[in-house]
Image: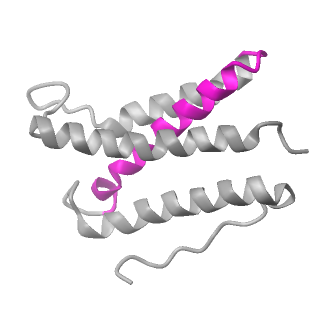
Amino acid sequence: MRRLDADRYLQLVLLGFGGSIVVTRLYLDLTGYPTVGGGTLHIAHSVWGGLLLFVGGMLPLVLKNRSALPWAALLTGIGAGLFVDEVGKFITDDNDYFFDAAAAPVACIGSSSRRRARRATTDPGRVGTSLPRCPPPGR
C-alpha cells in the first residue's frame, strides 16, 4: 500500500540530498576547506551525514504524528547528501576528496533517486520494484 503524500516526502529527500551537496561544496570552497576538530583530528562531513541519516530514520519510528514525516524525509536527504559527497575519499587508496571518478557515483545516485521519485508519482505500483542501472565510472 502506497503512503499518502509519498511524492512530497520523496521530493523532500531529493531536495535535501542535492541541496546538501551544493551547499557543502559552496561552503567548503568559500572557507578554504577547513577541518572540523582542529590539529590532527578531522570529523568528516560524512560522519554528520550518518548522524542525520540515523535521526531521519528514527523519527517516524518513535513519533506517531504525521508532522515527523517531512522532517524525516528532509534529514534523510541531507544526511545521504553529506555522506555521498565524500565518496571520493572512500573509493581511492589515498583518501582523495577530489578524485575525478567520484562524480559518476554521486551523479548516478542523484539521477536514479530522481527517476525513482518520478516513477513513484506516476506509477505507484512500481515503487521499490527494481534498482536502476548506472554506467561504470569513466563512460
Instruction: State the residue at coordinates (33%, 56%).
Output: 90
Instruction: State the residue at coordinates (65%, 22%).
Output: 59
Q: Is residue 54 magenta?
A: no
Instruction: Name the side, left or right, on which 40 lies relative to 79.
Output: left
Instruction: State the residue at coordinates (53%, 30%).
Output: 75
Measuring from the top left, give residue 73's x and y in whole percent: 61, 34
Q: Is residue 64 magenta?
A: yes
Q: Identify the coloring.
A: one colour
Which region of the structure is painted magenta? 63-91
Main SS, magenta residues: helix
| Front position in the image: 62 or 5 | 5
Measuring from the top left, give residue 81's x and y in whole percent: 43, 44
Would residue 128 be visible to someone looking at this image? no
Instruction: State the residue at coordinates (59%, 25%).
Output: 71
50 to 38, vertically: above or below:
below
Instruction: Name the side, left or right, on which 117 lies relative to 17.
Output: right
